[in-house]
Amino acid sequence: ACSAGPGSRASSASFSSELRREGNELFQAGRYEEALAVYARALGLCAPEERAEKGLLHRNRAACALKLEDYAQAERDASEALKVDGGDVKSLFRRSQALQQLGRPEQAILDLQRCISLEPRNKAFQEALRNLGSSMQEKMRNMSCTDSKVEQMFKLLLDNEEKDLDKKQKAAQNLIVLAREEAGAEKIFQNDGVRLLLQLLDTGRLDMMLAALRTLTGLCQGHRSRTMAILTELGPERLLAVLEMEAEQVCLATYNLLQVVFDALKEGLQKEELSKKDNALVPAKELKLLLRRLLEALTREKISGYGRDSLLNLLINKVPRKSPQDPNNCLTLWVIDQGLKDILEVGGTVSQSPEGLQVTENTHMTVAVLLNKLYGDLKCDAERENFHRLCEDYVRSWFQDHGVPGQLRAIQTVSCLLQGPAEAGNRVLELSGVMEGMLALCASSKEVEQLVAVEALIHAADKAKRATFITTNGVTLLKEIYKHSPRDTIRIRALVGLCKLGSAGGTDFSMKQFAEGSTLKLARQCRKWLCNEAMDRGTRHWAVEGLAFLTLDADVKEELLEDKAALQALFHLARSENQSSLFAVASTLVNCTNSYDHEEPDPQMVELAKYAKQHIPEKHPKDKPEFVHRRVKKLLGAGMVSALTCMMKKETAALSPACRELISRVFLAAVEDPEDRGAVVAAGGGKALIPLALEGTDAGQTKAAQALAKIAITTAPEMAFPGERVSMEGGAVLPRECVSVWKLSWSDRKHHNVFGLEKNTIRSDMMLQERECILLLL
């Protein structure tokens, strides 16, 4: 390698200055992000002895960061510039502005005073100092007033003699609101608030416990040191004791608090990793301790069903990586090694068993989602093989050594795996005796055993490796159960198994599995059970599962759309708390609107297939466009968009990326006709589409973005997307969320076909509005 001489250093300095001037021009044009990038390149070219040039570049970067509202970066860059020249008034002033925004007014005043000492006649500095002084005085007065209010609120809440419940409720609400602001949260914390909040938590009264948990969440939000202090004083045991309550609201509030605590601990883990050359292979100590306690709590008998669901949802949201680009999946690997057995134990709990853990109607679905998330976060074959081994060992141990109760638990675990990571479920199905034991329990005289076995058989029915085996051995058995079982809870599950096997031909009209009319009979029975309000929601869910398969048949679709009571029952179930029905409802609507992917066969290939006597898929006559159009109209009139919007509002693990994609497809079908777009918007469809376009599968995001674009063509943005506005070039004012979706749609190549055309292409046959909309977005 050749050492650089004086000539090369001079060239580097010249290029650095040229880049700085380019950055200045970009800054003057308001292109702050580009300017920041250019200044960064220039810094990289500066030689160590070019301290003055580095100081100028850091000062300019601070100006960009202020414009971009990145105040922490602005403070860092201004400080770097001041290391070069401590008397640089521009850097001092910019740092004072950043410090003020970061909530450090005392340091900001020191910088402003230094500015005035250097330039005593500068009116801008004088005005800034006066304003900051006034705001600090106001803040001090408010803090003094806040101290008094905090003390009064706690006194009122902890006073057992106080009988005015409205007054107590108002005090609790004020405390929660105060904790959401940094100044208020700090005041509560400094005034012995944590100890007093724990007293509220220990009262055992629902309203007081909710107030305490929500206030603690506000104190922990975005503040790691405060979170660590609160966690130390609170202790995991007290939190887990709260999760023993059969109160859904309390469990949800505890879940929110744990989320904030988890975020603070993960932030510490990330900082720890950044300080090391290699990524950490184990979580930080505090995070590991908390995770261990949560995993152990999953199998604690006293934890309520709602509490268990909260713990599972926390693991779903906080353990797997948010992006596959993140190279570190250490949390997932640690949880699999330390806690997969506990997760499988919850998944293997038989709901109707009196000795089992307490679970809700959503627990098994939540376990399936967690298992799927953990498996999907694995990066290599060795990690996946370890997951398979642990699952197989667990199922084998219960299946072989614990008689019928053990077999029942093993089969329930298999059922969860089949709904989650299907590859792991398939591997377990291959274990010796598992499938045979499942079929044997299907014929059991005991309702619980039959329920678990039939459900597992249903989930196994579409797994390729076992499809032939089930068709050969299971169809006859399911028919017998459906015809002769005295229990509707069993019959409906057997019916769904038959529906699943009967829909093997998909939309191919020529591939009917059952005799003529049998599919319609099954669908009518499903609708009958769906409309029977005397049945529990869990049983009615299976009726929707059956329709999700049977509606691949166009005759079934047409009959369903004529049955208003069945449609209302379907939408009512979508709005209910039963999370396990979401995917089945969405699948049924996708089938009814024909919004699944289907390609028209090439006529030449069809002729070749006929000549070679190969099977040619046939389209049902009632799946022609005019039939589909009428079905969409009927669904809109029945309240479909309202149901979809309610589904999107649910914060549930069951709203998986695949489920979100199905909802996006239905929305796109609903806005196909311009006349229907106003009704979709009026029912909240525009707002519901935004999160669908920002998160989910690639196909789901694209479908949602296409639906948004169609709405934007014919509907005023302020009506379609009510909310915060941003200005775009040309003076247009559009909702911030809408702009972010459209920017995503055009900037990411996987979304380049959002409008159904190639990027930067405008067809001559387009409506004027469409062309204007596309030009604006480009």
Image (cartoon, rainbow, N blue to C red):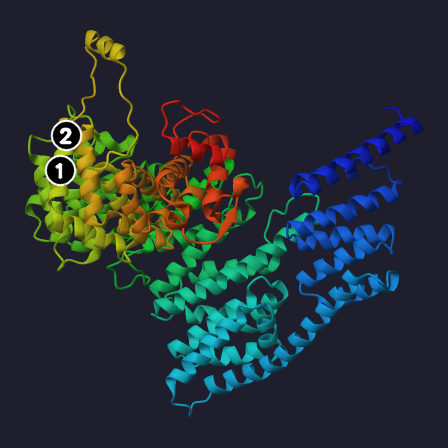
Q: Position of residue 553 (x, y in %)?
A: 16, 33
Total residue callouts = 2
Dot 1: within a 10 Å radius of its alpha carbon, few (fewer than 14), some, or many (20 or more) residues?
Answer: some
Q: Position of residue 123 (x, y in %)?
A: 79, 62
In the image, farthest residue toward the right: 6
Q: Left or right: 89 with respect to 622?
A: right
Residue 11, disc: none
Q: Position of residue 509 (x, y in %)?
A: 16, 26
Gap between marks 1 and 2 measured at Cα: 8 Å
Mark nearer the N terminus (1 vs 2):
1
In the image, farthest residue toward the top: 611
Residue located 25% across and 12% down the image: 603
Which residue lies under the disc numbered 2? 622
Residue 661, quarter of picture: top left
Position of the N terminus, as image quadrant, is: top right
Element under disc 2: helix
Which residue lies under the disc numbered 1? 558
Residue 202 visible, this orientation: no
Are the two marked residues, 1 and 2, in contact with CB atoms closer than 8 angstroms?
Answer: yes
Of residues 325 and 75, which is closer to you in this image? 75
Q: Please, what is the three-letter code of the amino acid marked with disc 1? A: Glu
Q: Please, what is the three-letter code of the amino acid marked with disc 2? A: Lys
